[in-house]
Every structure is written in structure tokens, then in C-alpha cells.
Image: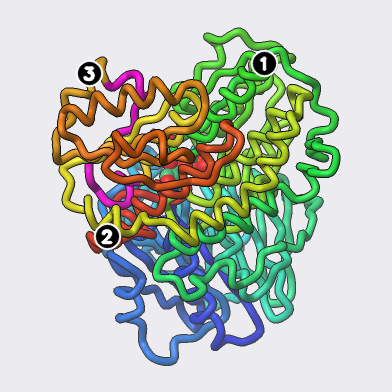
Amino acid sequence: MCGIIGYTGDDERAVLDVLLDGLSGLEYRGYDSAGLAISNASLSVYKREGELSNLEAVLPEGLDGFAGVGHTRWSTHGPPSDENAHPHTDCQGRVAVVHNGIVENYAPLRAELEARGHTFESETDTEVVPHLIEEHLADGADPERAFRRTVERLEGSYAVAAVFSGRETVYATRQASPLVLGVGDDGHYLASDAPAFIEYTDRVIYLEDGQFATITPSDVTVTDERGQPADVTVRRLEWEPEDAGKSGYDHYMVKEIHEQPTAIRRCLGGRARELDGSVTIDELTDLETPSSVQFVACGTSYHASLYGARLLRERGISAQSFLASEYDADALPIDEETLVVGVTQSGETADTLSALRSANRAGATTLAVTNVVASSAARACDHTTYIRAGPEIGVAATKTFASQQVALAMVASVLAGEFPRSFVEGLRDVPDDVQSILDTSRARSIAEQYEDADAYFFIGRGYNRPVALEGALKMKEITYKHAEGFAAGELKHGPLALVTPQTPVFAVIGADDASEKTLSNVTEVESRGAPVVAVTDSPERVERHADATLEVPDTHPCLTPILANVQLQLVAYHVANRLGRSIDKPRNLAKSVTVE
Ligand code: M6R
């Protein structure tokens, strides 16, 4: 959702640069306003509605200081505005606070504080925090104690960081909202996500719920709720600074689409072995074969989970996918032999975390399939496997979806103890197959041809249904045009009424048994005059029915959707680009959705 950055270091002139670099690296998390506060002889606070450039435009020359915090916002309480942008301050301007999450009890706290004479300047839930701190300072507490005592009063989810006038320390804590500390040589950092400071340090500490961090230029101290030193691990990130940049591409999304061969190779590395046709996932060696599997996930990750569930069912393991926000563990048969798998790129999606926690309470065994090491999902589950996609900055999930599909294909093989050789060989070839699509795709000309369409429909059957849904999600989120994905067989049960010559239908058609039926569905739309774009590994079978084809390499039928999706990503990207959309930061959306 929102993004937080904090820094304190030896070089006072570096504060502003670090905060601005961090904010630009975090804009993908929220981008309706941005702000920063720098502690110097007093406290300098600047904030503006809109993109980071609006904030940069009002910053004075030579702004420096001892320590600072910054924030990009995705609004929940109060619309985007200068006033509602973070940081928020107390009545005296002695403390500045940035916050990600929701303070659920802010209304009574605000009423209480107003009754005691505090003046509020925003509509946010966050603003209660600096005013509570102010009261504790007035009672004689030092900044650290004032910060802790304030946090004791907060209910809900939060990552909070604060700086105080004239001080070089940044205080922070978290509860169900991510916060990572960066341990540098010349200073220390904190952020919602490591890419915000990766160019300065790759040594990180992931803060746990309830832990407090106190960072000074020379020290990082982590304590628990009682103020006792906490055990922390300093990890070294394997990401390179250029992972967080655009590397010459116009958008992160298209860069990340092109990173898929590398991401998939990394996901497969040491797991799928061509030589003996086996799959092993080291993290899962002690995971028993479950009696049944329930997937919980949202958005794109849900589509990946539909694919994973189908693979498991095909191998004889009962499996279902649930939208995490609709998951009801109490209404489902669950015991310790039930495996509940949370599929979540960020590992921080509130709906998915809530579903996983309810599954834990119901006695299930839980597994997180995630991209982010030590994320909340990883910590909430009994087992974790990482998809190793590297940082994904574009709000539209692309390479993480591909890596999720590949990871779930391997998880299904491991759980079922079944590794058809052609499948493992096909998996090993996926990176090269994706590369050949990227090298030859005609998606740009298809986008040009259909950019004015009234709506876009996507159909697929069996293994190809999840990518039909995903193709539509990608199209709608970055082009803002109407797009729907359907099971191919469902078209005739209603959606066919929407089909016109102005609604291109993208049909994903593999070489498997089901594809004959999908071809019949294609003729149904063809005879209503809709243009058909077939995404297929067998163009000769479909060319009679299709107006255009987007070809994918021939592979194992279970793997066709991984390849077909790349073509659909490219079509959505090129349509959005032609329409001049804000591709990496589509309106109203955020990369990591940490509210339910
Ligand atoms: O981080 P997660 O995978 O849990 O995120 C779930 C969804 O919010 C996410 O997949 C969303 O649908 C995509 N960003 C859309 O491209």
C-alpha cells in the first residue's frame, strides 16, 4: 500500500538524496501523494498531493539534517491531498510520523485528543500518532518511551516510523505491515521494501510484528514489546541495484516481462533436474503428502493458484482454490493433513495473510509460496517455498506470475511424487521458450489493430482457463478498458450476448484433448462477427477460424499456459502504451494490498 523510507547517517547532506531515492523506489506501492520530514535544528516537513515530482518541486535548495523519514501514500482515510499526505506532525511540530496500514481505533483516539485541545490538520487515521507522542513528551517521557507508549494504544495494522526535531534517531515498529531495516557502512535505513535502499546496502534485518527498531548513524537496535533486546538476523540480499531500475526499458512492466526467462531459470535452479527427470524442493523435503490442498490467494496470484490446483487434481490430490477474501476455514473440512497454500508474490497481502492465519487456527498445515524472503506470509506458515523472481516494481504482476506457475508446477510434482519426464523436460525448456516468444512476438501489431476495441474477451479451457482470466485482469488494470476472462465453455451460457465485431476474443488453445471443444467455442464467436486472436502452439489447426494468431512453442500441454500468458502480457502492455496509460502505476491500484 503506502511506502515508508527512513534514514540516519554520518553525512547530513545525504539525507535528502536517500529519502528521494527511496521514495522513487517505493512509488509503486502507492502514489497519490508523497512527503518527507528531516530532523535538523528543527523539523522540516514537505508534502504534496500527486506524484513525487510535485514534492520535489517544492523542496528548498540545500535541505539537510540529521535523520529523516519519507512516505508515498495510497489513500484509505481521507482523499489524496497535501493535508492528508504523510508525514503528520503534532501541534508543536516536534515529531513527524509516517505510517502504512490502518489505525482501527483512530476515531475514539482522535475524539479524546481533540477534547484535550489537540488540533488536527488531516482526515487521516495516522495523525493521532504524533499527537499521542506529543502528550507523552509533555509528560516527561523521552522520545523512545513516548513512541513506545503511543504504539501501545494503537489497534490495527501498522508500520510506523518517527523522527524528532533536533535528533538523529529514527524510531520504528510494525504490526502486520512490512518493515525492513538496512544496515549500511555510513548510515542505517528502514523501508517498507528493500528496493527502496538496495543501492546503498544489501544487508537487511526484517522486523517482526511487535518489534521496535531504534536506528542511529552508528547503531541499529531491535527490541521486543517489553524493551528487551530481540534476536535478529542480518541477511544479505541477492538482488543487484539494477534489479530495481528500468535498465533502459520504458516501463518496469515491460522490463519485468523480459526478465521472465531469467526469473524462471532462477526458480527452476537446482530443483528440476533434466538428467534424472526429477524435481526436489529442498525447503519442502519434510512436507508430507496432504490428503487435500486448499489454495488461498488474490488477483493474479489467485489465477496462479487455479493452475496449481488443477495440476494437483490431475495427479490425484484433491485441490481447490479460494479467493482469500472469501475463504472461510470454519466452513471447510480441515485437519492437519489438509495443506493450505497461500500464493502471494509480496507475502504481505492482508486478505491472504488473514486466510492463512484462519487456516492455522483450524489446524491445517500451511505453506507460503512467495517471492519475498521472510515476508509475513513466510513467517505465518509452517513451510515456505520461494519463487525467486527478484523484485517486481510494476504494479501489474508479470514475472512473478510466471514464476508462481513454475513453482506451483514443481510443488505439484513434489507433493504427488510424480515427475513425468516430458513434463520435467518441458519445464526446463520454459525459459528458452519464453525467450523465443519475446524475440518473435507479434503482440505489438495485434495491439495496434485492436487498440480501439470496445472490450476484450479472453477464453481458455482447463489448464488455459487461469491465463484467460489473467489476460483479462492484465488488460483491464493497465488499459482501463473493459476486459473479461471466461472458461471457454461458459461463453454460450451468457457472455456470448456481449460479443460484437468490436470485441476481439483472445482464445488460448493448446494441443491437448480439450482444444477441439475450445475450437467450437471459437466458431461460436466467429459467427457473431467478433475478431478472434488465437494464442496457440498449433496455428495450422486454428488458422481457418482465427483472424490472427500469436504463436507459442510446442510444449507439454500443462505448460502451454505459462507461454501463452507472455503473449497476453505483451498485448496488454502495447495496448496500454498506445493509449498512453500510466502502465507501472495504474490508477487506484497499489502493488501490495495490506488492508482487507
Ligand atoms: O502480493 P500478492 O501476490 O498477494 O498480490 C495479490 C494481488 O493483489 C496481485 O496479484 C494483483 O492482482 C496484481 N498486482 C495484478 O497485476
- CA–CA distance in space, label 3 to label 1: 32 Å
Reading the image, the residue beneath label 1 is: 317
404 is higher (above) or lower (below) than 143? above
Query: Magenta stretch containing residue 19, yes or no?
Result: no
What label sits on residue 581 in the rendered view?
2
What label sits on residue 494 in the rendered view?
3
Residue plotted at (15% across, 41% down): 502
**Does the residue tagged 3 have its C-beta within 8 Å of any atom of ligand 1?**
no
Query: Magenta stretch containing residue 487, yes or no?
Result: yes
Left or right: 266 as drawn, with respect to 321: right
Helix or strand or loop: what does disc 2 sit on? loop
Q: Quadrant of residue 445?
A: bottom left
- Callout 3–callout 1 Cβ contact below 8 Å: no
Residue plotted at (29% across, 74% down): 54
Amino acid type at mark 2: Arg
The mark nearer the N terminus, 3 or 1, is 1
Label 3 Cα neighbours within 10 Å, binned few <14 / some 14-19 / many ≥20? few
Name the residue furthest bottom. 62
- CA–CA distance in space, label 2 to label 3: 31 Å
Q: Nearer the viewer, residue 588 or 439?
A: 439
The mark nearer the N terminus, 1 or 2, is 1
- Start-end of magenta stretch: 475-491
Residue plotted at (44% across, 25% down): 515
Helix or strand or loop: what does disc 1 sit on? loop
The mark nearer the N terminus, 2 or 3, is 3
